[in-house]
Image (cartoon, helix red, strand yellow):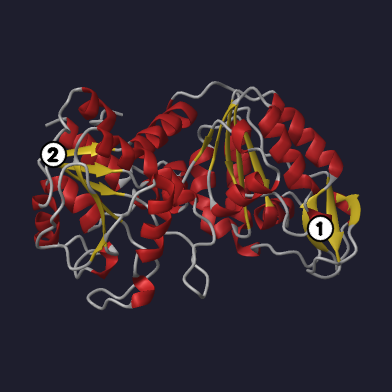
Amino acid sequence: MNVIRFEDLVAQGQVTGRRVFIRADLNVPLDDAGQITEDTRVRASIPCIQMALNAGAAVMVTSHLGRPTEGEFKPADSLAPVARRMGELMGREVPVIANWVDGVDVQPGQVVLLENCRVNKGEKKNNEELAKKMAALCDIFVHDAFGTAHRAEASTYGIAQFAKIACAGPLLAAEIDAITKALAHPKRPLVAIVAGSKVSTKLTILQALAKNVDQLIVGGGIANTFMLAAGLPIGKSLAEADLLADARAVIEAMKARGAAVPIPVDVVTAKTFAADAPATVKAATDVQADDLILDIGPTTAAQLAQQLKAAGTIVWNGPVGVFEFDAFAHGTETVARAIAESDAFSIAGGGDTLAAIAKYGIEKDIGYISTGGGAFLEVLEGKTLPAFEILQRRAAG
């Protein structure tokens, strides 16, 4: 994918003394007291900011946070907690600037955080007048927020249209490289794990992957629907009976290519959905009418682990069971550790997936951990993300 890369501009000496506008993804979770509970996105944004500062740029950074109402700023919408954490990580004060659209005072070697961009009227609808004002603030626009790459908004798309130079920051560039390696030029076999509660939310992803992958592992409520489609009993487990034809179509599409959707041979069941519910391992054919399937069984997990260890490329989105409950976490842990031990290039994305990676401490053993939820899913669907499209267009001149 041909885009201008910020690090190349730095290497060429094009950043010194320039005004640089970085769109970061600083949409972090906050508790009721307004404290950050998980700072991965803040930490991930620092390399790009530091790169710009080291090059002698005047640096402006912005992001959305939460779901503010456009045109109505409330203290709860403020990026102030993010600025504090950023300052701690960088060992310097990071001032927060409000009402910044019409002008920002920032000098080379300084960094300022521009208040929540979603408060600006016209942000979400990619208002052209707003986008042009943002573009006028800078010499170089840097998109470094993969988590927003699937949205065409004023601070992600419009500004990239009108800025003098529009480029990809190191975080976005790394996502582009990892996605290209995993999906455009994968080392085979290519194995995809798609798990979650509903087939309906991931159906287009399953259909897109069925055309490309060698093994399509389904988990969670999605697996229940596929089990039902394969004629297996699932008791009172979560499933979507109206999508059985779609599930069968995915199975047939894979089969036609000599590929497979492995259906669980054993499962872990309970009578109620609770952390302390007694867990029972049983053959997939023996599920009772009052059973809930909450995990894959040990035989299935071992079979999947063998496939993952033999893979060339692994794409992972979603835990295969209710891993938050220890009695129903063995399947996800077995799969996670198999991915970690595999020689395959692995790319993982999605909130629950990242939580599982953190729970089992395997961050260093995953090839690439994606920072985007919705954007990662849209890439898996085969869609061209707006951010990629506009950056490629600008690179082409």
Q: Is residue 271 left or right of residue 208?
A: right
**Label located before the other in sequence (2 or 1):** 2
Quarter-of-image position of residue 173? top left
- The residue located at (36%, 58%) in the rendering is 83
Judging from the image, what secondary structure is the residue with disc 2 in?
A: loop
Q: In the rendered view, would you say 325 is above or below 396?
A: below
Q: In the rendered view, would you say 374 is above or below 259?
A: below
Nearer to me, 378 or 352: 352
Q: Whole-percent x and y of residue 61? A: 27, 51
The quadrant of the image that shows the C terminus is top left
- Which of the two discs, 2 and 1, sits closer to the camera? 2
Q: Whole-percent x and y of residue 53? A: 26, 39
- The residue to which callout 2 is attached is 18
Q: Which mark is residue 233?
A: 1
- The residue located at (41%, 36%) in the rendering is 175
Nearer to me, 242 or 86: 86
Judging from the image, what secondary structure is the residue with disc 1 in?
A: loop
* Cα separation between marks 2 and 1: 64 Å
Nearer to me, 38 or 193: 38
Q: Is residue 183 left or right of residue 307?
A: left
Quarter-of-image position of residue 222? bottom right
Dot 2, crowdedness within 10 Å: few (<14), some or many (≥20)? some
Q: What amino acid type should be assigned to the residue bearing mark 2?
A: Arg
Q: Does any portion of residue 219 appear in the rendered image?
A: yes
Q: In the rendered view, would you say 89 is above or below 179?
A: below
